[in-house]
Image: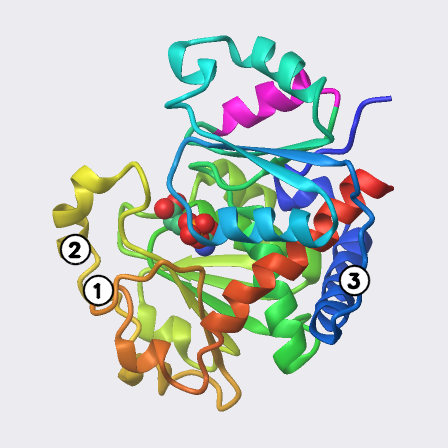
Amino acid sequence: MSPRHFLTLKDLSSDELKQLLSRATELKKMHREGTLYEPMKNKVLAMIFEKSSTRTRVSFEAGMAQFGGHALFLSPRDTQLGRGEPVEDSARVISSMVDAVMIRTFDHAMVETFAANSSVPVINALTDDYHPCQLLADMQTYLEHRGSIEGKKVVWVGDGNNMCHSYMNAADMLGFNLVVACPKGYEPNEQILSENQHCVTVTHNVQEAVTGANLVVTDVFASMGQEDEQEQRLRDFDGFQVNQKLMALAAADALFMHCLPAHRGEEVTSEVIDHPDSVVWDEAENRLHAQKALLEFLICN
Ligand code: CP
Ligand code: NVA
């Protein structure tokens, strides 16, 4: 039987996603109470990082340790993947020795190829196209602060990037309305948009978009791999900063989220990040709990 993978949020059904979010909150409570729960004794997670990371690495590594298992950090600098060993061959070899593989890379097709040749579950820990693990944490955070997100207005401000695409999938699966407010030329991928069309609107008018929003989310203007475009993007994203003036247009109960790391003073001001309506620190911590729920779902089921 081929293993379950988590390459995009849509590898889960809506019901599985909702169950996983509630399990994440349960695991968080157990962790806070100091309950020992080690379902992954002798289990190993291989973590392939072709891009930098703080939250993703720490949360997966800490999560495996707390579950009584082990996580293995693999960088292309010191594995044969970085010297051109085919992804297919690497997948067969690595998956024959571990219980799950987590990958952060550039091309989404790489994780698909890896998964197609892996005998164990593969988790997408960010590609140029998607960041589904972050959405688990974001949706858990909204649920914990405000209850169900169904029917709410969520506004994505900024680049139509990997995070934006995963928000589009979440809107479809959890039934919220997503408005993407981006500069011309930075719209989300058309194919992913067409898959989620009924619940996503794209606009270039950020003020109109944020009006009445229950959740406002943004991300860096230039993602990893786009460092050369930083200066151009700073100019193109003029007017798309999330600041207090913009947040004042949102609904009274609006939350602010950012997957982090943030460029304070660029896409968001410090005032907004450090405001009581900002839940970015809970969002970051929930990476741990949500991914523990994901690991349990993929490895122990
Ligand atoms: N949000 C997120 O994925 O952070 P890292 O790049 O630090 O892992
Ligand atoms: N869009 C950002 C997210 C970082 C967690 C990037 O891909 O760099």
Using a 10 Å C-alpha cutoff, classify the residue at mark 2 as few (fewer than 14 neighbours), some (14 to 19) or many (20 or more).
some
* SS category of the residue bearing label 2: helix
Q: Is residue 272 above or below residue 188?
A: below
* Residue drawn 52% across the image and 23% down it: 109
Distance between mark 2 and mark 1 Cα atoms: 8 Å
* Residue drawn 74% across the image and 51% down it: 67
Judged from this view, the residue extending furthest toward the bottom is 252
Identify the image quadrant of the N terminus. Answer: top right
Q: Which residue is mark 3?
A: 23
Amino acid type indicated by mark 1: Glu
In terms of depth relative to the viewer, which is nearer, 207 or 89? Answer: 89
Q: Which residue is mark 1?
A: 266
Residue 81: percent from the left, percent from the top?
A: 46, 16
Residue 121: percent from the left, percent from the top?
A: 72, 31
The disc label shown at residue 91, or none: none
Relative horizontal placement of residue 184, taking residue 163 as reference (left or right) = left
* SS category of the residue bearing label 3: helix
Q: From which residue to which does the magenta span run? A: 108-119
Q: Which residue is mark 2?
A: 234
